[in-house]
Image (cartoon, helix red, strand yellow):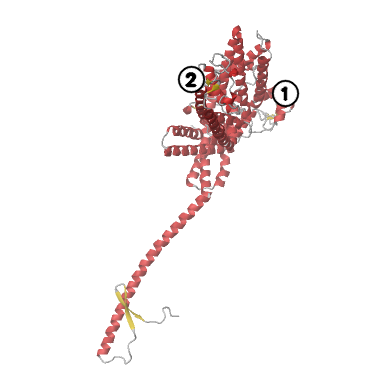
Amino acid sequence: MGSQILRVACSVILNALSKKEKDPSNIKEMKDLADDFEKQASGVFSECYRNNHLHAESLLFQKSLAWGNKTCLQLVLDAYIMSFMLNGGVQAILTKIWWGKLSVDNTFIRVLICIVFFPLVCINFLQFRDPEVKHVAEGKITDMAADKRETKRGDIESAKDDSREVRQEVEVKRTDLAAENRGSNSYLPKVQQKDGSKKEQGTDGKKVRLTCLQCLHGFFTAPVVVFYYNAVSYIGFLWLFAYVLMIDFQAAPSWTEYLLYVWIFSLVCEEVRQFLCDHKDVGIVTKGKLYISEIWNQMDFVAIILFIAGIVCRLITHWAYVGRVFLALDFIVFCLRLMFIFTLSRTIGPKVVLLKRMVKDIIFFLFLLTIWIVSFGVSKQAIIVHNEQRFYWILQNVLYKPYRTLFGDILTDVDKTAFDETKCSVNGSDIGQPKCPQTQNGVPVFPEWLTICLLCLYLLIANILLLNLLIAMFSYTFSEVQEKNDQIWRFQRHKLVIEYSNRPPGPPPFIFFNLLYYLVRNVIQKWTISKKRENQLDNKTTDLLPWEEYMKGKYLFNQQEMKKQSSEMKIGDTSNKVDAVVTLLDIEQETHAKAMDKRLMLLEKQVSQSREALNWIMKSLKENGLASKEKAPIGKCVEWGSFELFVHVRQKVYPV
């Protein structure tokens, strides 16, 4: 198991556990640890991509049996790990997959011209990548040319032995970062990919042109071309749908309507293919959960159900109009589904996410608004009208009319001056008119001042307070999405790239030919090529793991070196050194102070003994009559410790 996918899986597990944990401190600790694993996974992949982008791509798309036979990229997508998706290497690989065999240097205008006039592909109008590298869709590893496979394996085997030495260097820290980087080049597989060339290297070293058939195949299978063809096809489908609904909806289906049926059936076949093929290694129930968890698939499912209901009703004569209503509603869903193509745009793509979040804000806002509308509507209806029995008019007066008031349609039935008996039904017998208010002598009896006050209070809270609350919620959501605009776009782009890299080249309704071709090919290759291919991929994955382990060691070593060079670490080291010096000075000062005290005590003893000896001599001389005629010098005794010192009196403390 690779260290990269292991760190991603740890992040996924910690994020899942944090959602079930109740202790805030534990939640924060789990999230911090998950973020740390995400950074490490992204850092290891960046190190791998800088040294060999082909092997890094293989590691990104290799499947792991320990994690549900998913790839590292699938785990990142399922767990919504944004930081990993923002990695430059991941985005570069996705860009390469998006362009397929086409060079990324091709401009959008050139691709668009070739989509309209595809024979231009055969005359060097577009640039192609080196055909030695073939990109495979999600869950597959990059396939390398046979003439270079053995060379690269030999390089990886050498990396196994050299990586041990590198790890030892990391542990003992005997080399600096620059030396380690210079030495690492000998461990890396020498794989070079040429981009922007439409020629390939032959066995004799000469460049050989791609044939016209190879150019056409590379062009039509490129996900970017598949996307644009599908977008144009979908717009044509919506045009045909609108034409049938508004112009050519006959009693008996016309040829355009039959074409519409075939077109939608091709869309249904594509959805079935996605359901069966996108998650091959899980059961039907799990496939259903994964399929329905995507909002675009939910819209497809609703659109298909509405279309089936519309066709069933349309084929029944007396339900034809109901069928047309179902188809009209279905057209709305299909139009909303068109927003998916805007996820490719860096500007419009995040706005689609913004719309989805705003819809959630509106749903929560409607709960508050409904409470206020119902409270006002019921009270107004109870005050003005007595015993209204018709449910339709109850809904009109309680919900619909107060709701219209929010948009400027002021109620007139709260004012007695606007009362008109010809516009209402006294007993409620006329279905087309509301019931009249309770009257006395032709004048409504409800308190006009109360209903007007209720209306003013309702407008004050609904139009000013609640609507401004909704605007504030929208502003917060917009600012939140705008801060992560680039992150959201890159994440959406990944979904788009993976989906269209797995799609058949032909757009609906021509997708039937592709599906038939894939069906026959899969049956033929099921027991032969697929098993052989799986064994090759397993062997290749095993060979790449030591190389990934070496790159992990290099990344950790670089992180340690960067940490050493950081200002915080330097300040910390300096502070530790200063503290050590201060401690040594304190110890030295304490030692010297004790020695000085001992010396002073010894000197004091000697001075005391000398004084006693001098006193004894003076006393002896005095007793023998040998005393001096001069007076003895003036002095005084002072206490110093436990000894008396005879100190000579000076006029200055510090004589010069």
Q: Quadrant of residue 527?
A: top right
Q: Is residue 619 left or right of residue 391?
A: left
Around disc 2, counting alpha carbons within 10 Å, would you say few (fewer than 14), some (14 to 19), or many (20 or more)?
A: few
Q: Residue at x 53, y 46 (%)?
A: 562
Label 2, label 1: how many angstroms apart (C-alpha)?
42 Å
Q: Is residue 190 above or below residue 323?
A: below
Q: Which element carries disc 1, helix, strand or loop?
A: helix
Q: Position of residue 219 (x, y in %)?
A: 68, 25
Residue nearest the observer in this picture, 443 or 129: 443
Q: Is residue 516 left or right of residue 642?
A: right
Q: Position of residue 119 (x, y in %)?
A: 73, 23
Q: Are marks 2 and 1 in contact (CB under 8 Å)?
A: no
Q: Which residue is mark 2?
A: 285
Q: Is residue 160 above or below residue 599?
A: above
Q: Which residue is mark 1?
A: 116
Residue nearest the observer in this picture, 253 or 450: 450
Q: Which element carries disc 2, helix, strand or loop?
A: helix
Q: Position of residue 341 (x, y in %)?
A: 63, 26
Q: Amino acid at mark 2?
A: Val
Q: Count all numbered tags in the image, as a single digit.
A: 2
Seen as rendered, the residue at the extreme front is 441
Instruction: Work out whether mark 2 precedes mark 1 in sequence or the reverse, and give the earlier one.
Output: 1
Q: Is residue 73 visible?
A: no
Q: Is residue 564 above or below residue 578?
A: above
Residue nearest the observer in this picture, 447 or 407: 447
Q: Amino acid at mark 1?
A: Val
Q: Is residue 609 left or right of residue 578?
A: left
